[in-house]
Image: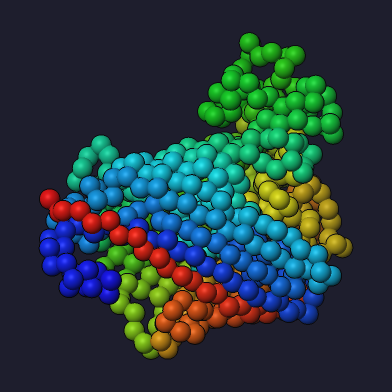
Amino acid sequence: MIKRLLFFFCPFLAQAQIEVKPVQLFTEVGGFYGTSTQTPFWLRSNQFGVVPTSLPYATLRAGVRRDVRYYSTADTLPAKRRNFFGVGYGLDVIGNVASGGQTALLVPEAYVNMRVGALELVGGRRREVVGLVDSTLSSGSYSWSGNALPMPKIQVGLSEYTSFPFKNGLLAFRGFLAHGWFDNRSIVRNAYLHQKALYARLGKPNWRIKLYAGFNHQVEWGGTTRDLTEGLVKNGRLPASAEAFYYMMIGKSLGAQTAGVDTTYYSRFDRENRIGNHLGTIDLGFEYSTKRISILLYRQSIFEDGSLFYGTNLEDGLNGIRFRNLNPASSGFRITGAVAEFLYTKGQGGSQFLDADLLRGRDNYFNHSQYRNGWSYQGNGIGTPFITPMTDSRPDLPRYGFFVNNRVRAYHAGLHGGFGRQATFLVKVSYSQNYGTYEMPFAQTVEQFSSLLQLGIPLNQSGLLATVSAAADQGGLFPNSNAIYAGIRKTWDYYKYRVGRAR
């Protein structure tokens, strides 16, 4: 509408380039009601840590965001030239009110990002999911699912698939390298995050068949502690020198290095293992797409303690299929996306670890001997929510390590669609069989069923949206609970225009 008015009053703009810089503001207020003090699984999981395990009474949220990209109305300029440089930012502030009146203030996003060509630089906290997976309906990417509060970090990389070194689009890459900071509330304080990922796509964007392959690698390393014995740490410090960074980054095992290791700096545990707590996945994908549908098959294979290298945990991983409806939206009932997944983490290379026979087992996913809070941040698991921390599980279940349940067989399905005029729905259902850990197994298989139904109903054409979510837990892993969330969100979109002559 604004563009038409500009063209009506200034006819010469018909041949001009108009760059649109959108800025979006939002605010939301909502309340919870449940039959238990614990929030149901799918009402809190993969919510970037903003919904606590203890069911809150109310929440108030506000934020502002500007896209790093500029959108141009001029079709005469190539997209790379229109969008060569851009600066964006985001800020979210959330206040959760407990039933007793206590308020917890969270900042899940506070970042600035800059793009130069295909390269993006990001600093701060930003919501993201790492791995080849559907980010909306999935049970969660294995190693970085969006289950925990985003971690502050500096990141540089390719945020979109970019053709390199060839320009015809046949082979494209995306990936990043990041350095981050863990919180200071765990046994090890001031620990660092090292993170990197690289993914390749074979096939041009308009081809019906495309193949994907890549990996992601995360390491918690460095830090100080007063709670670990001398065999696990030297002088209260975990290695963080330039040499230690090199060993950590390439995943070099000091146990395989027979000479040159400083025994006054590296503890016995470090000398027998790798520097830091390593984990990640190797991902494969196959996509078939037309103008109407897209189908993606994906597989995430787990590496954490050498078992994948030796081929002893090949059965473990996340397997999924995603369907997307690419037809234009209609006013009737429609399915826009669906996901079915199977997660298996029960193997872990077997129940024995025998290094002399090259048998790498007993991986104890997400737990670690030095970093006793395991693969967690601000009390929540960073990876798949099906691997359960002690704070979420029933108190009568056995306890060993921060994650008391990492041997899991889980089935998950998700469905997304619309109805009426721009109203949406989302459904998630999951069933899991849980076995505890090798060190402290459950006495018998613990079954768990969790579900979620979410409705989004626009109240007007000016960005006012009502959201209603109902979730339930039934089984032996979590307390049985049912809860409802209802909220109202208002969104304002602002646009800034810069006019220039199209060339």
**Lateral position of residue 126 relative to residue 236, left or right:** left
Q: Which residue is painted at 52% across and 74% down in the image?
A: 490
Residue 108 visible at all: yes
Where on the picture, by quarter, is residue 374? Answer: top right
As displayed, is residue 163 above or below residue 288? above
Q: Nearer the viewer, residue 243 or 349?
A: 243
Snapshot colouring: rainbow
Give the quadrant of the N terminus: bottom left
Point 55% across, 23% down: residue:
246
Can you give x and y, in whole percent of width and height, for residue 329 in the image? Answer: 34, 79
Left or right: 75 with respect to 63? left
Q: Point out residue 421 in the picture as x, y percentages from the top left corner.
A: 41, 86
Residue toward you, 127 or 361? 127
Which quarter of the picture shows residue 102? bottom right
The x and y percentages for residue 258 are 63, 14
Foreground of the two, 212 or 99: 99
x, y percent for residue 360:
64, 37
In the rendered image of this protein, does residue 291 appear above or below residue 350? below
Q: In this rendering, is residue 431 above or below 296? A: below
